[in-house]
Amino acid sequence: MRIVLASSEAVPFSKTGGLADVATALAKALAAAGHDVSLIVPHYPMISAARGVDPETFQPTGLSVDVPVGGKQITGSLLKTSLPDSSVSIYLVDQPAYFARGQLYTENGSDYPDNCERFSFFSRAVLEAARLLDLRPDIIHANDWQTALVPAVLEIEYGDVAGFEETASVITIHNLAFQGQSWHWDMLQTGLDWEYFNWRQLEFFGDLNLLKGGLVFADKITTVSPTYAEEIQTEKFGCGLHGVLENRRDDLVGILNGIDPTIWNPATDPALAKNYTADDFEIGKAACKADLQKRLGLPQRDDVPLFGMISRLADQKGFDILIESAEELLSAKATEAAAAAAEVKAASEAEKAAAVQAKEDARLAKDAERQRLAAQREADRAARLEAQAQRQAEREAANNPWNRAMKSATQSASSAAGRAVAGEVSKAIFGKKSGAGASVVGGIVRGILGGLFRG
């Protein structure tokens, strides 16, 4: 697929948070999967220079975008660069009045007052850049409020533009708390007609809300995890947009954020005091901990827990919880808690080992039972075979000619002897007389005696 990613920041050129990491890592991953990927970001010359990016890496394309903002046409030029070991094409929108500043979004703790104008220009510039570069995207992927106007302008104005007839839009929510909300007159900066300033689209309690517009117009919505996708549909975590998100729930998908393993890899990270893998992490992490303690002027003790937190100083990051717990964490109780945690961990590991052993014992018992049943079946089979052999032997013995001759002779002898005895008995009873009575008695006696001899 041909994919255009639009982001207000991307490493290594600019960064305030995770959006910058994800934008670059996702672009690289999609390109590695075989897609044609272009990443479009603003050009912040002061910020990229401060981050050590060589200005010579940005090459002019000779193309300029010209878009309507606030009733006037604003022009910006397109630069191009690339990433090492990646086929991603990176385009930067250069507009010094908007982006040649010391910070991305704020100054002295307050938002730039023209943020809506700046990123309305950038959102429109993304679409114009895609048209001028003939990218013909299958998908345009917007991110957060800064590019949330892209799906709206795409649907309203670019449906009939060559190269965009089949283009779908996706918007990713990285942080719902930031929505690009400003007063209603900033609707003029978007260049869109006032008919779209209504409660179903860009209006939000009387103000303009860029992120809401993106959520309404995008074909699909993604966010940073399945759990977050569920949470932001609730009043507690929806930051006022839970109704919009619940209405789009069939198009909302939570995809767990990943990392770029070419950067975040303790086995190869040059910033670590000692590299390590899953096989030797205990040694490696202990060395890194000791190095950090030394660099921060802390006592180098392996028996004291070391807590680290990398974050912006924002309320939603949980610093209020940290402050409330700081005294306890910095006291001796922290060490006690660590020891207790170690005991719990050891107990848990023992339970896991016992569960594994029980599972193995059950498997062995099951194997033994199977072997016993197999042996019983074999014994039963042997008994059946022996019984069959015995019956066969008996049949063969009965059909043997010699045995039949012997049996016949025995029966004949028994019959002759019976007749002789019967005769003697008859004589004893009737004397030499003969007749019907003698014949009957003789027959009875022969029958009895014959049965005895045969038996």
Image (cartoon, helix red, strand yellow):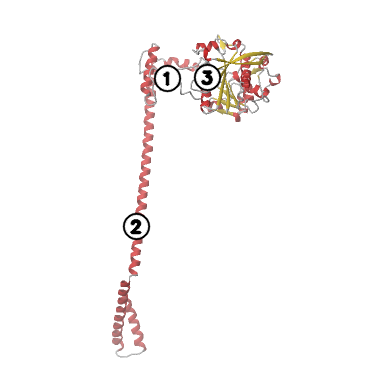
Marks 3 and 1 close (CB-CB < 8 Å): no
The quadrant of the rendering that contains the N terminus is top right
User: Would you identify the image quadrant in which residue 100 lies?
Assistant: top right
User: Would you identify the image quadrant in which residue 333 lies?
Assistant: top left
Work out how far the residue at label 3 is from the one at label 1, CA to CA, in angstroms. Answer: 22 Å
**Badge 2 density bin: few <14, some 14–19, many ≥20, Cα 10 Å:** few
**Badge 1 density bin: few <14, some 14–19, many ≥20, Cα 10 Å:** some
Disc 3 on helix, strand or loop? loop
Q: Position of residue 159 (x, y in %)?
A: 67, 25
Work out how far the residue at label 2 is from the one at label 3, CA to CA, in angstroms. Answer: 80 Å
Q: Which residue carries the number 2 mark? A: 383
Q: Which residue carries the number 1 mark? A: 269
Horizontal arrangement in the rendering, residue 87 relative to residue 366 (left or right): right
The quadrant of the rendering that contains the C terminus is bottom left
Does the image show residue 455? Answer: no
Disc 1 on helix, strand or loop? loop
Disc 2 on helix, strand or loop? helix
Q: Which residue carries the number 3 mark? A: 82
Q: Position of residue 354 (x, y in %)?
A: 37, 34
> Which of the two marks, 2 or 3, is nearer to us in this view?
3
Q: Nearer the viewer, residue 246 or 71?
A: 71
User: Would you identify the image quadrant in which residue 440 lies?
Assistant: bottom left
Work out how far the residue at label 2 is from the one at label 1, CA to CA, in angstroms. Answer: 71 Å
Q: Position of residue 244 (x, y in %)?
A: 62, 25
In the picture, the disc for residue 380 is none
Q: Residue at x 52, y 13 (%)?
A: 56
**Badge 3 density bin: few <14, some 14–19, many ≥20, Cα 10 Å:** some
Q: Is residue 398 above or below residue 39?
A: below
> Which of the two marks, 3 or 1, is nearer to us in this view?
3
Does the image show residue 360? Answer: yes
